[in-house]
Amino acid sequence: MRHTISLTVENQFGVLARVAGLFSGRGYNIESLSVAETLDPSVSKMTIVTSGDDKIIEQIIKQLNKLINSIKVVDLTVTDHVEREMVLIKVSASGESRTEVLRLVDIFRGKIVDVSPDTFVIELTGDEEKISAVLNLLKPLGVKDIVRTGKVAMQRTIQHDGKGDK
Amino acid sequence: MKMNGAKIFVESLKKEGVDTIFGYPGGVVLYIYDELYRSDIRHILVRHEQGAAHMADGYARATGKVGVCLVTSGPGATNTVTGLATAYMDSIPIVVFTGQVSTNLVGNDAFQEADIVGITRSCTKHNFLIKNVRDMARTIKEAFYLARTGRPGPVVVDIPKDITIDSAEFSYPDSIELPGYKPTYEGNMNQIKRAIDMILVSKKPVIYTGGGIISSGASKELLTFAGLLKAPVTNTLMGLGGFPGEHPQFLGMLGMHGTYAANMAVTHTDMLVAIGARFDDRVTGDINEFAPEAKIVHIDIDPTSISKNVEVDVPIVGNAKSILGEMNKLLKQDRRLKEFNREIEDWKMLIAQWKESHPLTYKEGGKLKPQFVIEQIYELTKGNAVITTEVGQNQMWTAQFYKFSKPRTFVTSGGLGTMGYGFPAAIGAKVALPEATVIDIAGDGSIQMNIQELATAVQYKINVVVAILNNNYLGMVRQWQSLFYGKRYSHTDMSHKPDFVKLADAYGARGYTVDTKKDVVPVMKDALKSKLPVLIDFRVEEEEDVYPMVPSGASLKKMLLA
Ligand SMILES: Cc1ncc(C[n+]2csc(CCOP(=O)(O)OP(=O)(O)O)c2C)c(N)n1
Ligand SMILES: [Mg+2]
């Protein structure tokens, strides 16, 4: 099964290599990884998407915890969370298909960020489902290239009902 | 006070209580060596950096203190990699300081540059590259702290040359700030109680312990625990010495070359209490047939060891000493204990039968037997010696025939199985414990891997005894070829080798040859009194095999017995 893991680490050189080495050294797969500084510049946050059976995921989480530079590991998959990914799509757009592309971009609330006589570059943000839906619709029109950021994810704040919360 | 990096280095080591460094100089560590010239820290000049790393490791295993090693950049650093990997696999606390080219040259393929932090990332507990002299003291503090706490392990600190020249204010920090590193020592009380409930209803319990007993200093607690339960105990290779070898409840080692009784007991147990052991494949054989009917309690300081190879019923993360202490307190008051002791009587009878029907043994006659040599070494030292080994048959026979009774008396490369480990490790142990008798039980192949350290031993009068079980073969590999490759002894003949007596002589050590039973004891006695390091060439039976043996990957009950 696929898991989205949020990893808080000390923002030091070499930490990304330790994380990557942990996966490669044990034969685990990284499907996507994104990393950047947090509000506290001494700390970075990574979002890692990986897959494996329960036993492998348990090992991955324990191994990530064991890294000296890791501060916090959360398997977001088992919590309520939001996930987003951004994709840039270069799509052929000449003649009639130009309006069709514009319509799709509008429906999915994307943005055109580059225009040439026969292509558009579309910027689109969403969860995985939305992005694959758009890609499926665009493919027949001629997708020339895509770049995806990989997922970023965040735990939702627990909504209290106001009655006797702690 | 302001001082240069080299001086900060030496002052920091003093703060850590370091009395000995095993090292080898080179260009980028000359400022440090210049500082050592003025310091009273003992420096042992090795003959190969691999030797230095194993010596630091032997020093650490014999004492529990952190072993320290200092080498130059590039080849000096890469030569320690086998030593680091050896210490990493067996969770041994050492700190290896490597010199590095100056910070402005790092990444330039400079002369003698090696990315040692990159190279050792997967065989150290952690590693550091110091980029500013102001970080020197704090980094050294963290390195020692990481090496010895939690699950211990090796740490590398890479120090560029310019950092040893730059100056900073020296103050050694008294606290550690590692936000992501908080090892768990105390076991969860609920889990401990659950474990006891589970153990006390079992009928066929086995206590299976490993190196965690040694590293946490829990052998007294283990003895009490086993005494309360009156249950049988088996040790892994790394666990030997954690429980008295002559104790009536002791089954010996388990696993590939374990005893019949130990392997049968874990195969038929209904309650396996694993403490500081990690279910290594050399222990479990076919994992699906390992303790198939057992409930498992697993006590370990490292959460990643738990449920890695086998599913466990009650995991308890923490330090074995403190957890066993808690369990003993509870057991002493537990009314169910008496009943439990009675209920397991049948099981103990069955085990006694296994022990009696299949003791560890070997056939007399023919040439000198390696097992006989080890038995005599045991009789002569009665457990009052530190025994190191090389790797192969010599190691397995030592584990079987030397009855270790105290922790930190058996020093062997378990996880990595490093040939060439035993001799430098013996030197390290002897440096740490100058009064102790230290014997490396070696093979004729392995001893040639770090034989150069004989010069080190002679130079510093580190009088260890090397007992070479010389079978003219890479014996353990030959044994596999004999059993599983139709006796095709492909490249395992070791008969071409130096005359060990002359070799000892050439180095200024003492050499002996022994080919008969009657000479074993007199020569050993002589050797133990020697004022020089000793090499003894025991010419033993060439094609002797180690039994029992579980073929790699087979179930433990499929032991070959002879
Ligand atoms: C550095 C290294 N290389 C290779 C091996 C594989 N190996 C395991 S045991 C062994 C033979 C050891 O021969 P020897 O030291 O003579 O010991 P014996 O088994 O004969 O007692 C070999 C080659 C190893 N463990 N370590
Ligand atoms: Mg041999």
Image (cartoon, helix red, strand yellow):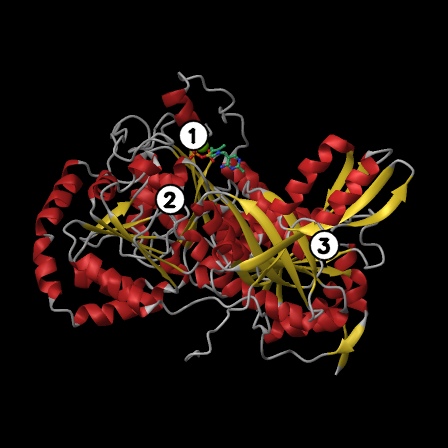
Q: Which residue is mark 2?
A: B523
Residue A124: x percent and y percent?
Answer: 73, 49
| Left or right for B368, reference A72 | left
Q: Chain of mark 2?
A: B
Q: Earlier in the sequence, mark 2 or mark 1?
A: 1
Question: For the residues carrying marks 3 and 2, which lies nearer the camera in this image?
Answer: 3
Q: Nearer the viewer, mark 2 or mark 1?
A: 1
Q: Mark 3 near mark 1, Cβ–Cβ under 8 Å?
A: no
- Which numbered dot is residue B72? 3
Q: Residues within 10 Å of mark 1 (few under 14, many from 20)?
A: many
- Identify the residue shown where x is 48% and y is 73%: A160
Q: Residue furthest bottom?
A: B1
* Residue B78 seen in the figure: yes
**C-alpha span from label 2 to label 1:** 24 Å
Label 2 within 8 A of ligand 1 by Cβ:
no
Q: Which chain is mark 3 on?
A: B
Say if disc 1 is inside 8 Å of ligand 1.
yes
User: Which quadrant is the C terminus of chain B positioned in?
Assistant: top left
* Disc 3 to disc 1, C-alpha distance: 35 Å
- Asked whether mark 3 lies closer than 8 Å to ligand 1, one says no
- Residue B453 appears in the picture as rendered: no
